Amino acid sequence: MKLKKSEEIQVLEKPDLPPLKSGTWRVLITGGAGHLAYHLVEKLVEMTRGEIRLEMEKELKMSENLAKNLSENEFSQTINEEIDKRIPDRIQLILLDLVEPPRDMLKHYCAFVKGSFADNFIIRALLDDVDTVFHLAAVGMTGQHARDRSTCMEVNSTGTMHLINTCKSKNVKRFIYTSSVGVIFTGNPLIDAKESDIPYPQDWYNYYCESKCHGERIVREASNGTFKTTVLRFNGIYGVGEKRVTERALDFIKSGWWIAMAKTGGVEAMTQLSSVDNCVQGLIKAELALRHSDSEHGQAYHIMDREQCGTFSFWAPLNRALGFPDNMIVFPGFLFRKAAFWAEIIADYFKFDPFISVLEADLLLITTTFSIARAQRELDYDPYPSAMPEIIDFYAGSRIDSKEKSQRKWNFWKKISLSIAIFLIVLPILYFLIYPFLLIFLYLNIWILSVFLGVNL
């Protein structure tokens, strides 16, 4: 079902999907227009195609008859056409989002409904015969909602609770919720943190983290024998085409202004990020695990890459592949955090997204590494290697244009400019910190001299 952008949802009809047959897996994905949903849909369909192909290979009689009369290419095409016909009988996907997804997502086994998952009317109309819900949608990470606590709580917390209640009334079996390490990060280092080690905090960096924490607790507490839930925590989702982290970092690197890095105590912080492929693997394996009668449910799992990396140096291979030098200016972490603090205040006042938030700054300055042992043990999670080689191949494999060459040419002078700027900022700070002590030291020496010489100076 597709609606014009100007239309409001007044009366919702069921999505335009083929009639449901026995054994068809019907899935609802909130946040269905997002980058993660796009890759989840691709993987679910790829899995379904593989299952159907295996079944067809067992149908030896049909295959032998076809092979006798068709060439190899014709035979392969016929098999693929038959798989396409069978897919809607095996899986049906309903995508729910406020923004329309890419057109190539809307296949004959995939329907789109424009609306909010927090709207009970929409949800009740969609959840008939749904087996699994992948709840990917949330608000407040960026944009105007990030400054609005009531909206964050209403959508991410209360909306999730309404969604769960409706799922239960509609006999949905499995519910997978995507969360963030922001729900447990309070500014203290996390070293190989296990899910059971870190209690939920009382204070959070922003409304998004607070509301997602409440949503996570609601999801976990709602789990029971007939309605099973799982929470997956991601950290810095990245990959080809991902805009929030990857293309934002890419644009900054290509601008030629990535000429410095911040370290606390001269040591770079370590972290573990979550590639899109690993996020999708976690989502699918969490769903498959919940199908077992004796499966763990109501649990939270860390879904990250296996590799730990430096928070800044993770992007160094991409920087190098784009032709920029490795050498960086290193400055104290407290200056970087102060810059983020003032950037956030200014952005809040003028109502735009800051260049970098305090949460993002602290995640770059403070070590946050996580244990994935529980996910490996209970979900059979086996993380793929870092996606950085794929990112480099995609973004740095093409010919570099003249504009980018020019930006690289001025890289040295940008470093000089930044060094001067930092010096001009630090000098007054040092002056105001040291000057009072110099005056005290001077007056103390004058007093000692006057006492020693017996004169009034």
Image (tube, rainbow, N blue to C red):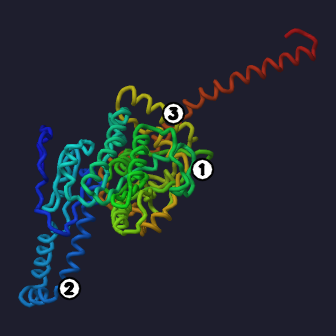
Residue named by callout 2: 58
> Image quarter for residue 208?
top left
For the residue pair 146 and 273, the one nearer the viewer reads as: 146
Q: Position of residue 24 (x, y in %)?
A: 19, 67
The answer to whether residue 390 is seen in the rendering is no
In the rendered structure, find residue 327 and report the number of the disc placed on it. Answer: none
- Under mark 3, the amino acid is Ala
Q: Position of residue 381 (x, y in %)?
A: 42, 67
* Residue depicted at 36% across the width and 26% down the height: 350
Give the CA distance from mark 1 to mark 2: 58 Å
Label 3: which secondary element: helix
The answer to whether residue 238 is seen in the rendering is yes
Give the CA distance from mark 1 to mark 3: 23 Å
Give the CA distance from mark 3 to mark 2: 70 Å
In the rendered structure, find residue 421 and report the number of the disc placed on it. Answer: 3
Residue named by callout 1: 267
